[in-house]
Image: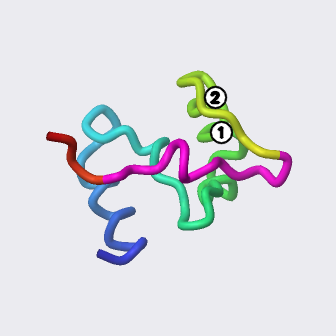
Amino acid sequence: MTPVGVGWAIRAAGETKIPWQRVVNAQGGISTDNQHPGLQRAMLEAEGVRFGRDGRIDLTRYGWHGPRS
């Protein structure tokens, strides 16, 4: 699925269905700051996610690794 497709799926699901704040770009950065400056980062930090000096998260630490058995 493309990033645009993911965005439309999240938007169609409504605010309470999918934790949209957990969707970051492939470099571990936030792509929503144009619409909601600081909101996504604040929500992630409230969940315990830490950002590097470059404003990105460590995808090795916080990335999705597929379903767990």
Magenta segment range? 53-65
- For label 2, the residue is 45
Q: Mark 2 is on which residue type?
A: Glu
Q: Mark 1 is on which residue type?
A: Arg
Furthest toward the right, the residue is: 53
Above or below, 28 relative to 20: below
- Percent of width and height locating residue 29: 65, 57
Q: Secondary structure at mark 1?
A: helix
Q: Residue at x 60, y 32 (%)?
A: 49
Could you tell me if the residues under marks 2 and 1 are in contact, i.e. CB atoms within 8 Å? yes
64 falls in the magenta region: yes
Closer-to-camera residue (66/15): 66
- Percent of width and height locating residue 16: 30, 32
45 falls in the magenta region: no
- For label 1, the residue is 41
- Percent of width and height locating residue 32: 60, 55
| Left or right of 43 on screen, residue 55 | right
| Left or right of 27 on screen, residue 17 | left
Q: Secondary structure at mark 2?
A: helix
Furthest toward the front, the residue is: 69
Q: Residue at x 59, y 41 (%)?
A: 40
Q: Which mark is residue 23?
A: none
- Percent of width and height locating residue 37: 71, 46
The answer for how far apart the CA atoms under marks 2 and 1 are is 6 Å
Placement of the C terminus among the 4 image quadrants:
top left
- Does the magenta stretch mainly form a helix, a strand or a loop? loop
Closer-to-camera residue (41/66): 66
